[in-house]
Image (cartoon, rainbow, N blue to C red):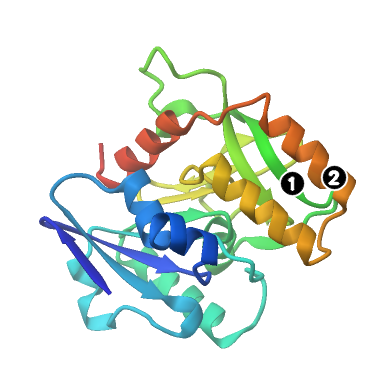
Amino acid sequence: MRINVGERRFALLQAAKDSEYVKEVYGGYLNVYMEAFAEEGQRWDLFRVYEGEFPNWSELHKYDGFVITGSAHDAFSNDLWVLKLCFLLQTLEAMNKKVLGICFGHQVLCRALGGRVGRSNTGWDIGIRKVSIVNKKIVEEEEEEMAASLSIIEIHQDEVYEIPEGAQVIASSDKTRVEMFSIGDHILGIQGHPEYTKDILLNLIQRLLNNDLIQKGFAEKVKRGLELAEPDRKIWEKVCKNFLNGR
């Protein structure tokens, strides 16, 4: 599937099937990511990597950047498509291409480039969490609104254990040591979801509850927390747009 909105070209490497809710309300995850990260004069191509749909290797040079989505799959699994994705990410890193990884994308990017990922020892992290910015260069330290911490939507039970050689930690939280990492100016991983809205998170919580993956008491506590907090979506979106566009 290809959507044309202009000249600069990006690829969304979708690692999860569109949920019925996201399809009904947003028309699919491509639209969610484009709403958050796309700008005027850009073309975004969709590749459902979880179904084995990958960009043509001979066309990788045509892209200005790549975004890897979240997923319910394990970034440390040896499923064929995950291993192929790792090889693609190694290739993109060698080409010095802009690559932004979100949640699962953050983890699989870390794994592909030599880091370690796995299950969190402290269980699920779901809700809106404040992350401490330990290196402000990637998140516009010159901006007055840039605080020492930013709130972001989280929903994950895996995490980065060790970052790749040559990488640096950009943000941490009391729950997850590596909330963001970067390599040079072309690789950026974010554990949280800068693209999510609270309604998407609430639907995911309900699905986890329906599938007995979380307890009812935990789900209710998270929902109460969502009533009291808001993610810093505009700042996160700007961070991601600036990264992808080399600003």
Which residue is the site of mark 2?
218
Which residue is the site of mark 1?
125
Classify 227 as above or below 144. below
Residue 190 locus on image (x, y percent): 53, 47
Q: Quadrant of the N terminus?
A: bottom left
Residue depicted at 55% across the width and 31% down the height: 231
Residue depicted at 21% across the width and 77% down the height: 59
Residue 88 locus on image (x, y percent): 41, 75
Q: Is residue 152 left or right of residue 182?
A: right
SS at mark 1?
strand
Classify 85 as above or below 165. below
Q: Quadrant of the C terminus?
A: top left
Q: Amino acid at mark 1?
A: Asp
Who is closer to the viewer here, 139 or 36? 36
Residue 27 locus on image (x, y percent): 38, 61
Residue 216 locus on image (x, y percent): 86, 50
Q: Is residue 116 left or right of residue 52?
A: right
Who is closer to the viewer here, 141 or 204? 204
Q: Amino acid at mark 2?
A: Phe
Q: CA distance from mark 2 to mark 1?
A: 11 Å
Residue depicted at 44% across the width and 68% down the height: 14
Which residue is the extreme one toward the front?
Answer: 24
Task: Mark 2 or mark 1: name the one nearer the start of the chain.
Answer: 1
